[in-house]
Image (spheres, coloured by chain):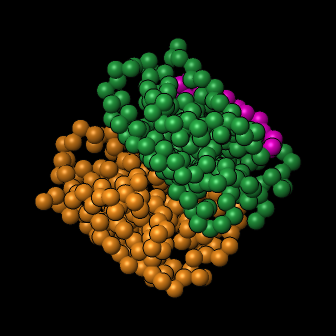
Chain colours: A orange, B green
Amino acid sequence: MAPPSGERLAPFNVFGMAASGNCHKVRMALDLLGLPYRWHEIDLMQGQTRTPQFLAMNPGGQVPVLGIDEATFLSESGAILCYLGEGTALWPSEALARARMFQWMFFEQYSHEPCIAVARFIMVFLKQPDHARLPELHRRGGLALDVMEHHLQGAEFFPGPRLSLADLALFAYTHRADEGGFDLARYPAVQAWLARCQRQPGISVMAPMPPAP
Amino acid sequence: MAPPSGERLAPFNVFGMAASGNCHKVRMALDLLGLPYRWHEIDLMQGQTRTPQFLAMNPGGQVPVLGIDEATFLSESGAILCYLGEGTALWPSEALARARMFQWMFFEQYSHEPCIAVARFIMVFLKQPDHARLPELHRRGGLALDVMEHHLQGAEFFPGPRLSLADLALFAYTHRADEGGFDLARYPAVQAWLARCQRQPGISVMAPMPPAP
């Protein structure tokens, strides 16, 4: 099982939106692993995920998509992280640690992103701080941050002790959570972890979300 | 990297609710792999995921939890499937096929379960066919079924050609989707795949959801 880095000459094509955390995860993985890529900016708001060309790459109509070759496309940020990171230093070598990495990656997609990313979208893009969904998103997103805070009181990373794909997955929307109305000052261990992540080469802050036209 | 089946003598402990698809995935994986386990029925509705004992196993307060030994617990159904299934016939041996398995498992947790499982919960447990959230859940759940139908027009399984962990993940709530108000007759390829899955030893239908007291 060779990681893609071991056999790769041509650049990957990434179809994504720079201000999307799910897409930013893929950028960080490629940067961190030193893999060549071309970024193709896709504007969701202009319907660019609904064109026949885009739906041929991903019938689910979501970014990011990784173009592996001219005819091979992979979607779902978590799956792209696994494809790029398997067998590298971001992939724990021990079975239980690897399962815990998956645990945090599924946690991120099920309990974190649907609250923290969606609150940011409503507040930054839609400019609706009085949106009816926000209180429930803030309640559930706060629970996700509580779970992260609890873990980080006893670990340096997810799952720890070294940076893994789960850190990339969780960093993406957590470091912009304030834009969705979450007060990160309430989560000191999360803040310290964000700072630790940012000292890793390849980890970068995400482009700001453009306001609606 | 030995799969847990290669080193396992003591039974696993599963803390789950029989009528939960996320828990049923774990049961099917254990049955299919012939791994010994004890099932501990947890009643969400009676607050049994909110006790200090349960939160010590999973601070996120969700079932299923896999007890690996007396002090080691793993949560998130997708992560448990990976832990149990890695290195077995349910785990594609080729890197791209493995990434596509992850793609479908993340798709299930992000785009399928939050609609199809939640609609079932509202209609069966809450007995509220007029619930305000149902039209949007049916719209988005229908899109997830469309994506599955599209894939299955060219493949026997997820990702294909053989049964993988992604099939277990998707089978769990899809085979009960009718209980949430989805008409599976509109998805002939999905219906044929459900029948193929049910011919595999270890794949079983889920316990019905008990009505509210």
Q: Judge whether residue B162 can be spotted in this image.
A: yes
Comparing B181 with B114, the one in front is B181
Outermost residue, right direction? B9
Side of B86 relative to A100 (left or right): right
Side of A134 relative to A159 (left or right): left
Comparing B153 with A202, the one in front is B153
Outermost residue, left direction? A213
Instruction: Give residue B137's position: percent from left, percent from top.
Output: 37, 35
Seen at 70% across and 44% down, the residue is B29
Please check the rendered image and state whether residue B35 is part of the magenta-colored stretch, yes or no.
Answer: yes
Q: Judge whether residue B27 can be spotted in this image.
A: no
Instruction: State which region is magenta.
Output: B34-49
Seen at 28% across and 40% down, the residue is A133
With respect to residue B16, does A103 lie above or below?
Answer: below
Side of A137 relative to B115 (left or right): left
Instruction: Give residue B196's position: percent from left, percent from top.
Output: 65, 40
Comparing A52 with B166, the one in front is A52
Please check the rendered image and state whether residue A5 is part of the magenta-colored stretch, yes or no.
Answer: no
Seen at 74% across and 48% down, the residue is B68
